[in-house]
Image (cartoon, grey):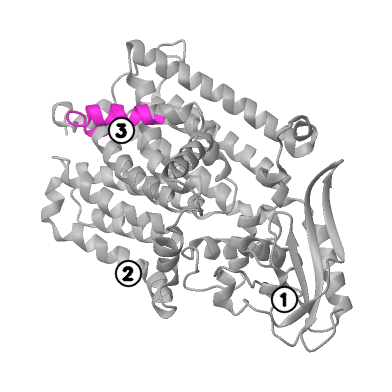
């Protein structure tokens, strides 16, 4: 294929970089940008590993990790890939570090694939910028070492977009089938991956270079491939009465009592601003507008718009409806905007160039300051003590502390209660963390007011004829009478106080509970 007949996107990806030398030298060869991206990815991996090994597991991580104790076709909250992969890494070693090895490797794969995608659409320098933008975005940094479904979904989503771009330039029949396989595996990571189906259809239908695939059977057979791979999730849900569908499309779809639409919009919008960076979030919105404006005449920005706007619109709508929505749900919708932001940095001129440069610099400085402050906070409570509005309940670090003492206290109480005694808590993540901390000895049950994964492994209500060590905390308070109707519980007889050199950040409360036909211990 000669230069005159190359795809316009491919030609642009080899065009000279236009960003002035005062940001980065103009004359650096593409291979050098690739080397720089590789060095940056290795540095990010080292930083993630350092943070991962400096802290214990968060409550949600422990809940996910607890699933690995019972391998299943799927799980109540999420598909099975997070549990399956963690089971594999847990064969190699124990402790928080091994739980987080997987996410750290997935993050490195995400960075490398993102570099490849951005280089393909724009240039090697833009690829470097994309990795740098990810490094500056808080939600991508933290999901880069925390055990969570998004850590698995992110690289698979970028691979999906790369394969979608390949449909433009190649005619092999297997290419749509590869997309179907990646989407199927991504669905095993998180249900959000189903959004890849409308994205793929829109991307192909709106691209003159790719539209030919709409007339080819292999494009539609890709859906069959995806469905076959997702069969474990479908089978598990069918056998259990579709609980995951009920959870995500019904049970969660209600705002907190008294929350107005305006308050819900603020809840979701402010969290997006914080998690995706107070400087970068408005920039991403600007990139989306820029992509929409250029979509008619530039296939690259058309792909960015198609792969981001529908995804973000759907997810943000669901998050406003769900009172317990989490800000990181929108991660995959921001991935194309990161690519677009890197492209703007690489190709823009004039006022847009100056604005893009300024935002890029400021975002890097702000993120560096936050990272240094966070590293200091990990080692000392001085920063927390200096903040008059500090709330330990809102500090993720709090979740990781004191579990060795909680484990020892629960073991002592269970030993006192005698053979057969079990432990219980009444919140899903507290149950998961407790089970991991005591290594399920004594067995841990989870009589939560809401259904949890423990319901599906016969660990909801403790047997009526055994004694129970009941655990709750200041963060996760529980009604012990409602939680253990078949038991009689005494008052709190043991508090595990988590103290960071004079700063109390959490208290765990232990009660001894006897079967109702016996006297409480």
Image spot of residue 516 (x, y percent) = 76, 85
Quadrant containing the N terminus is: top left
Between tags 1 and 3, which lies in front?
1
Asked whether disc 2 touches disc 3, contact meaning CB atoms under 8 Å apart, the reply is no
The quarter of the picture where the C terminus appears is bottom right
At x 70% / y 41%, what residue is drawn?
A: 391
Q: Where is residue 161 in the image (x, y as percent from the top left)?
A: 32, 45
- Mark positioned earlier in the residue sequence (2 or 3): 3
Q: In this view, does 203 lie above or below 444?
A: above
Q: Nearer the viewer, mark 1 or mark 2?
A: 1
Q: Is residue 26 left or right of residue 378?
A: left
* Residue 483 belongs to the span the image colors magenta: no
Front-lying residue, 143 or 251: 251
Residue 443 badge: 1
Q: How far apart are marks 1 and 3 (CA)?
A: 53 Å
- The answer for how far apart the CA atoms under marks 2 and 3 are is 31 Å
Residue 55 left/right relative to 268? right
> Can you give x and y, in whole percent of width and height, for residue 489 in the image?
79, 75
Q: Based on the displayed image, in which of its 4 quarters is residue 299 positioned?
A: top left
Q: Residues within 10 Å of mark 1 (few under 14, many from 20)?
A: some
Residue on which the image places disc 3: 121
Q: Give the range drawn in magenta.
A: 284-300
Q: Is mark 3 on a helix, strand or loop?
A: helix
Give the spatial CA distance, label 1 vs label 2.
36 Å
Say left or right for 132 vs 45: left
Element marked by disc 1: loop
From this viewpoint, is residue 26 visible? no
Q: Residue at x 21, y 47 (%)?
A: 202
Q: Judge whether residue 280 can be spotted in this image.
A: yes
Name the residue beneath numbered marker 2. Answer: 228
């Amino acid at each position: 294929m000669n230069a005159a007949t190359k795809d316009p996107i491919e030609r642009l990806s080899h065009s000279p970089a236009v960003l002035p030398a005062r940001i980065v030298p103009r004359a650096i060869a593409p291979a050098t940008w690739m080397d720089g991206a590789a060095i940056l990815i290795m540095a990010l991996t080292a930083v993630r590993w350092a943070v991962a090994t400096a802290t214990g597991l968060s409550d949600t991580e422990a809940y996910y990790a607890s699933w690995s104790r019972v391998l299943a076709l799927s799980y109540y909250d999420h598909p099975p890939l997070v549990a399956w992969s963690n089971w594999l890494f847990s064969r190699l070693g124990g402790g928080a570090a091994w739980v987080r090895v997987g996410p750290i490797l997935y993050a490195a794969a995400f960075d490398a694939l993102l570099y490849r995608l951005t280089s393909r659409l724009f240039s090697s320098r833009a690829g470097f910028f994309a990795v740098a933008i990810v490094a500056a975005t808080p939600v991508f940094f933290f999901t880069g070492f925390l055990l969570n479904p998004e850590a698995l979904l992110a690289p698979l989503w970028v691979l999906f977009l790369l394969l979608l771009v390949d449909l433009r330039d190649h005619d092999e029949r297997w290419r749509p089938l590869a997309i179907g396989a990646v989407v199927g595996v991504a669905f095993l990571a998180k249900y959000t991956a189903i959004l890849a189906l409308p994205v793929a259809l829109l991307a192909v239908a709106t691209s003159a270079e790719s539209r030919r695939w709409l007339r080819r059977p292999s494009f539609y057979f890709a859906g069959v491939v995806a469905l076959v791979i997702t069969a474990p999730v479908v089978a598990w849900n069918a056998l259990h009465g579709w609980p995951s569908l009920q959870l995500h499309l019904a049970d969660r779809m209600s705002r907190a009592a008294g929350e107005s639409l305006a308050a819900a919009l603020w809840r979701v919008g402010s969290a997006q601003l914080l998690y995706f960076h107070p400087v970068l979030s408005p920039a991403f919105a600007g990139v989306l507008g820029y992509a929409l404006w250029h979509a008619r005449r530039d296939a690259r920005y058309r792909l960015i718009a198609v792969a981001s706007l529908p995804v973000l619109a759907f997810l943000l709508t669901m998050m406003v409806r769900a009172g317990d929505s989490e800000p990181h749900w929108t991660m995959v919708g921001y991935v194309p905007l990161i690519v677009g932001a890197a492209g703007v940095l690489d190709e823009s001129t004039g006022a847009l160039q100056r604005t893009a440069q300024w935002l890029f610099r400021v975002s890097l400085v702000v993120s560096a300051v936050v990272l240094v402050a966070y590293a200091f906070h990990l080692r000392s409570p001085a920063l927390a003590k200096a903040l008059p509005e500090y709330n330990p309940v809102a500090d993720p670090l709090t979740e990781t502390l004191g579990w060795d003492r909680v484990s020892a206290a629960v073991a002592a109480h269970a030993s006192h209660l005698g053979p057969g005694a079990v432990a219980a808590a009444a919140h899903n993540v507290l149950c998961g963390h407790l089970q991991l901390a005591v290594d399920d000895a004594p067995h841990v049950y989870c009589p939560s007011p809401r259904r949890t994964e423990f319901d599906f492994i016969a660990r909801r209500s403790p047997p009526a004829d055994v004694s129970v060590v009941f655990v709750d905390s200041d963060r996760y308070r529980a009604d012990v009478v409602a939680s253990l109707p078949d038991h009689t519980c005494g008052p709190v007889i043991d508090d595990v106080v988590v103290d960071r050199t004079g700063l109390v950040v959490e208290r765990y409360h232990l009660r001894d509970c006897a079967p109702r036909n016996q006297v409480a211990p």
